[in-house]
Amino acid sequence: MIGRRWYVPWLFLTPALIVTAAMTWGPLANTGVLAFTDAQALGGGEFTGLANFSRLAHDDQFFRALGNTALYLAVVVPALVLLPLLLAQLVHTKLPGIGAFRAVFYSPVIASMVVVGLIWSWLLSSDGLVNAVLLKLRVVAEPLPFLTDSTLLLLSCMLVTVWKGLGYYMVIYLAALANVPGELHEAARVDGAGAVRRFRSVTVPTVRPTMLLVGTLAAISATKVFAEIYVMSSGTAGPGGQAKSIVYYIREVGLGVDGEIGYASAMSLVLFVGTLGLSVLALVLRRRGERSEA
């Protein structure tokens, strides 16, 4: 009887598979096809082979956006791997009212990135709170151009990304910390290990797979950064567009009546391959870690 009803689970999965195919697989396949054409926003386009990718190899703006994205990865990913772990360790203790602190730390996660970007734009503007405090304390002689200097704008966007992601990754680490055997900490405490030594020798090795997961999620998210840069620069990406990310540049190229859909699709395909490479690298590192522990 069970063998005759092998199709029953697939009946439940079919609606989700149809939606996934229509919203994900279909557009992905279409992008892969358009990447090898000179398609425009109003349609048309002919097969051009590798012409779009050849153009990418000589596109200075693309490499600038690629460099900005790589810098974003280099700064944001380590911060989002380490800081949420420290925060989770801090709020992991069972104290009265600790649940309220967890809720406060998590609250930025549920806020829209547009709202968060606007709030930080007000804080970091030339007449905003941050510059007012720095001037009052005489740390600086004049307001810092957080939103008008391309380097400071990119760093400010990184700050916003880290601030907003702290609570999300903190929850992931809290789940991992709940599975750390208490006996290990007790044994380390008996051996005279302090809080810092126990964190390094017990907590970190135990949650290392979770750290790899968080690093992978943070890296994938960082490669797709757009809203922070767009909102905090008022749609300019800084002076001369120097703070563009890859996604920002893809949107810029493909947007409007004159949008170059084929060229934007080629960049999207490169971004997809890069993101897939990060995922594969994380999987390889995880398997190596499991083998070394075994």
Image: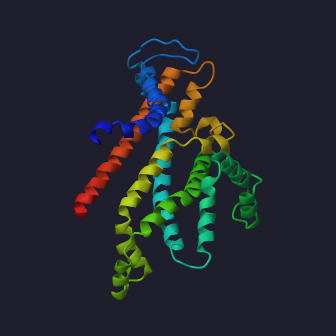
How many numbered callouts? 0
Q: Give x and y (percent) for residue 206.
A: 35, 68
> Which image quarter is the C terminus in?
bottom left
Residue occupying image coordinates x 23% and y 58%? 291
> Is 4 left or right of 67, judged from the image as shown?
left
Q: Residue furthest front?
A: 1
Closer-to-camera residue (207/235):
207
Inspect this view and state whether residue 267 appears.
Answer: no
Q: Which picture quadrant has residue 234? A: top right
Residue occupying image coordinates x 35% and y 88%? 190
> Which image quarter is the N terminus in?
top left
Closer-to-camera residue (92/48):
92
> Is 62 left or right of 42, judged from the image as shown?
left
Q: Which picture quadrant has residue 210? A: bottom left
> Is 46 left or right of 135, judged from the image as shown?
left
Figure check: 99 above or below 59: below
Figure check: 58 above or below 198: above
Inspect this view and state whether residue 91 appears.
Answer: yes
Closer-to-camera residue (280/141):
280
Q: Give x and y (percent) for residue 2.
A: 29, 42
Q: Give x and y (percent) for residue 290.
A: 27, 59
Figure check: 182 above or below 276: below
Residue occupying image coordinates x 70% and y 49%? 121
Q: Give x and y (percent) for residue 205.
A: 34, 68
> Is 125 left or right of 103, judged from the image as shown?
right
How has the structure been colored for display? rainbow
